[in-house]
Each structure stands twice: as C-alpha cells, then as structure tokens.
Image (spheres, rainbow, N blue to C red):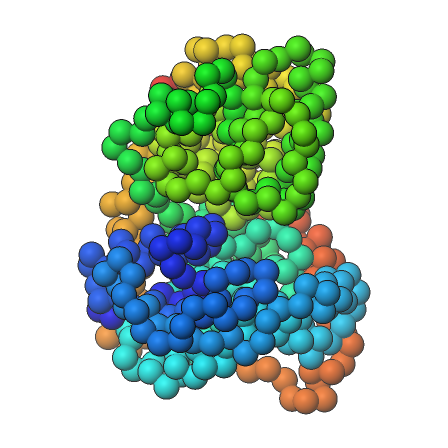
Amino acid sequence: MKLAIVAQRYGADINGGAELHARYVAEHLARHADVEVLTTCARDYVTWRNELPAGAERINGLTVRRFPVDHERSPEVFGRWSARVFDRAHSLADELAWLEAEGPASRALIRHVEEHRERYDFFIFFSFRYYHAYHGCRAVPARAVLVPTAERDPAVGVSLFGPVFRGVRALMYNSPEEQALIQAVAHNQDVPGVIVGVGSEIPASPDAARFRQKFKLPGRFMLYVGRIDENKGCGELFQFFRTYLRQMASRLTLVLIGRSILPIPDHPQIRHLGFLDDADKFDALAAADLLIMPSYYESLSMVSLEAWALGRPVLANGRCQVLQGQCVRSNAGLYYESYAEFAATLRALEADTRLRAALGANGRAFFRQHYDWPVIERKYLDMLHQLAEADRAGVTHPAIAPLPGWVARRRHDVPAASAVLAQAAETEAALTAPHRAAAPATEARA
C-alpha cells in the first residue's frame, strides 16, 4: 500500500502539535507501507513564508516533497476575515476568502495531489481548517482520509467544512470530544471514523537529575510545555500562579518550556527555559512534580500523554472539554475552571505525595492501554485495510458535494460560524456523555 501524508509544515525540527503528530504517524506507518510526505516550503506557522527549498528531500528515511506557498499570511487580513465569518452572517465567497487568508495556500501542492492521485492508495490529510486539507480532500475524495485535529473554536462551524466531513472516506479522531464536536456540527455519523490519537517517542531512561543539574533547579516545580500564548491559557496561568504563591506561601516554581509570544512575568518562581530539544523535555517531565495544561482549546494534548507515560500527574484547564475528558478517562489528572479550583487542586497535588503517585500510576496504565505505538498503528492499518476491502468489493461511497455557482456563493445567507457551534452544543454534549459515564478501573482513585 502506498500512502501520502499531507501536512501544512513538516520537518525533524518542526514541533508544532499537528505537525509533530503528522511526522510520528508518517514514520510509524512507514514500517507497514510505502509512505511519502507532501507539504509546503513553510517553516513558520504565522506567516507561512517560503523558507525551505521546493522539491524532494529525505527526512528520517522518508521522501518529503515540498511545494511553494503562493503568498504569506497577513495576520491583519486573516483577522478581518475571521471576524466576518465567525461573528456574523456572510457568504460562501467570504468563507473561501477566509480559507485563502488562513493558508498555507499552495496551488502547486493541490495540482500534485490531483495529477498523481493514481500513485497513492490513500492520502492522509492533517488539520481540516487549512487550505491544503480542504482543497486536497475535494481533489481526491475517494482516497481522502482526514485527521481533523479540531479544537472547539468557531472554525468547526464554517459551512465549507461540512461537505468535507461528510464526504471523505474516513476520519481519524484525536478524542471522543473531537468526534462529538464534528458529528454535532456536520452530522457525519455514517462516515467511517475511529478515535485513535497519536503516540509519542518516549525515551527509555529520562534523567531527572541531569535536568536539575543542567538548569540549576534543585527545588520542586510544575512544568508547562508548549507555545507561551494567550490562546493557550498562559496569561491566566501567570495570574493564577502568582496569586497562589501569595496566598499559600508556596515554594513551588513554574518552569516554562517553549517559545513565547506573550510577556513572561519577572518573578523569582517563574523560569522560562526557551525551546528545548526532546532529550531535555523528557528529562524535565521526569523531574517535575506535575504538568500544567492551561489551554482553552486542544484536540489532543500530546504532552499530557507524555507526562502520563512517565508517571507524572496533570493539572488541566477544565474549560477545555478535551483536557477534562482526558483527565476523567485516565483518572490521572485534576482540572479547574476558576481560580478557587486552581488553588485547591494545585495545593492537593503539591502537598500529597501519595495522590501524585496514584495519579501517575494511572497515567502510565492509560498510556500503555491506549497510546502505545502498536495500538495506534493497528487502528490506522485496520481502517486503511477496511477501506481497501470496500474498494475491491466495489462499494460506492458518497462524494463531496460540489460548491454552488458564482451567484449562490455570494448570497449572504450563511450563519455565523460561532452561532453554528453554539447551536451544536446540546448534541455535542449528548454524544460525549457515554465516554464520561465512569472513570477507568485503574490502580487508584483520585
């Protein structure tokens, strides 16, 4: 079987969530199939500037074909189109302009997909909201498998995406919450789909002492890993943590790993280490008392899974349904929705060694059961073989509905994406409920 992994950015040094997800899946499926990667020349997710050479190269044993981006993204232009599409009635033409502004627009990449559709048995597209995934899925719907990586934000309610969610061959969801969100908005329950997520490359022997010595961190700390950004909840985290330190007279340090686009408070118990390589990151997880995940929007928290694989508890923002669901299903984390809950849960984790150990043990069991690579690989391979069998049997499948004509595209009769998302909330909650009925029977209860 020959597969194409199609992603917005790709590289051994590109560690964004969806992009790292795509690379891990590509490298692991390459153990079972002939895999190529199709991507852009962009390295930066804000501008999509062409920084890498077009053409083919080899990365970790895989052929990676890069195609130029037609234009850089303007945050101001994208912001204006987002306000129009998300917040008020608009037209399909407006949504197409929003998608073009979102990027990374690469007509050369879409032409390659169209012209070489017979070369690949299936195309696995990452991240539904980007230009390459939307136009790529429409170009080869009979061979399109979508990994949506959808978060609970208004982009899911953009009407362009409904026909894609209903017309691809299969969807590989990150979590029950993501599946429920998309099904509530798109009504695509009849499209084959599986909750699969992604594994991680967990080192055999991360070294906590090495991390503490290298970065001069002898005391206890909680760890944040990721982009330091308002949208990731970091502004609220800084506010909550400083208040907690004043009220509780805690000696806990907050250690931050990742690039910052948000000012970091000048405080002796807040340490920003910048971007670190994987070895240092896993050493940090091994050394930490707990991982903090303050994000409002996630489709899957890979770093939470990594923390659990190493037996570390997680404290998460409960307003993110995905994070809350992961904590409930694993029984390996606590969550908060207000400062009072943040302070109470953090105090419990800081003070109770047995609680941290119990949650960590549950996390290890949860990771092994659901996120070890043999589990992930089998889910992908089972779905691909199921689709190939259907093709051999001559089973027909629905196509993606075509876009309407020029005049119809310009009618301002499309509801605001945020309103669509709000209207789907009741259905979404009903679809999610069975996955939250009971915590798993793991080693200890929190």
Q: Is residue 194 above or below residue 443?
A: below
Is residue 264 something that shows in the picture?
A: yes
Q: Is residue 236 above or below residue 78?
A: above
* Residue at (44, 40) in percent of width and height: 276
Q: Which sits in the foreground, 54 or 409? A: 54
Measuring from the top left, give residue 281's x and y in whole percent.
41, 36
Measuring from the top left, give residue 23's x and y in whole percent.
36, 56
Which residue reaches farthest left?
A: 32
Q: Quadrant of residue 266?
A: top right
User: Which quadrant of the figure contains the N terminus?
Assistant: bottom left
Q: Which sits in the foreground, 301 or 240? A: 240
Q: Which sits in the foreground, 402 or 389? A: 402
**Number of marks in the rendered image:** 0
* Residue at (31, 48) in percent of width and height: 376
Measuring from the top left, give residue 366's x and y in whole percent.
37, 32
Q: Quadrant of residue 271?
A: top right
Q: Which sits in the foreground, 33 or 202? A: 202
* Residue at (38, 59) in percent of width and height: 11
Q: Is residue 382 left or right of residue 157?
A: left
Q: Is residue 195 left or right of residue 27?
A: right
Measuring from the top left, give residue 301's x and y in whole percent.
48, 42
Is residue 141 something that shows in the picture?
A: no
* Residue at (57, 26) in percent of width and height: 254
